[in-house]
């Protein structure tokens, strides 16, 4: 699974876990490390961990385990490297502080609020 299918798979998992303000950034022209960055917000660090854990479990079931995971223990900002897609699950405090959408400035697609 890759490209659009992978984006849809990931965003469906995030929506199922009630992640908020899901944004898909197209950074293919900006970074050799990833084609897309997906950023979403959890309501708390516990919720961020739950969202990330759920995505991790479902990705493993689909035979596509992440290449790396950072921040799962802390939970305020969890990063999952899904090969061509980097997923950031952040609480509102981290999202407001780091403003990844502005930092990357790629073409973005907001999925929900």
Image: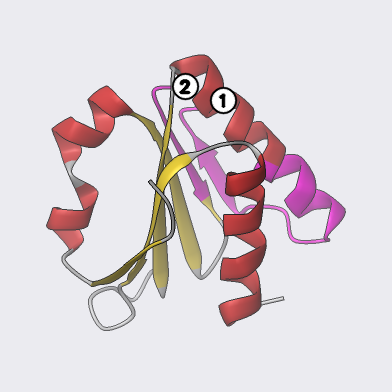
Element class at badge 2: loop
Tell me which numbered mark, 1 or 2, is placed earlier along the sequence.
1
Badge 2 is on which residue? 75
| Rendered location of residue 36, percent (x, y) | 41, 69
Kindly report the distance in space between the C-alpha atoms of the residues bearing marks 1 and 2. Answer: 5 Å
Density class for disc 1 (Cα within 10 Å; few <14, some 14-19, many ≥20) is many
Badge 1 is on which residue? 49
Is the N terminus in the top left, top right, bottom left or bottom right quadrant? bottom right
Q: Is residue 61 magenta?
A: yes
> In the picture provided, is 31 more to the left or to the right than 13?
left
> In the picture provided, is 59 more to the left or to the right than 31?
right
| Rendered location of residue 90, percent (x, y) | 38, 33
Badge count: 2
Question: Do tag 1 and tag 2 residues touch (Cβ < 8 Å)?
Answer: yes
Location of residue 49 by image quarter: top right
Residue 68, placed above or below residue 93: below
| Residue visible at 56% across and 47% down in the picture | 68
Q: Is residue 51 visible?
A: yes
Location of residue 94 by image quarter: top left
């Amino acid at each position: 699974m890759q490209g659009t299918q992978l984006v849809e798979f990931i965003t469906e998992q995030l929506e199922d876990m009630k992640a908020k303000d899901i944004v898909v950034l197209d950074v293919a022209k900006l970074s050799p490390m990833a084609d897309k960055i997906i950023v979403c917000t959890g309501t708390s660090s516990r919720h961020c961990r739950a969202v990330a854990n759920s995505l991790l479990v479902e990705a493993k079931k689909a035979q596509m385990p992440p290449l790396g995971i950072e921040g799962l223990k802390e939970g305020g900002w969890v990063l999952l490297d899904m090969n061509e897609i980097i997923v950031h699950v952040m609480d509102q405090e981290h999202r407001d502080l780091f403003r990844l959408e502005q930092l990357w400035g790629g073409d973005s697609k907001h999925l929900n609020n």
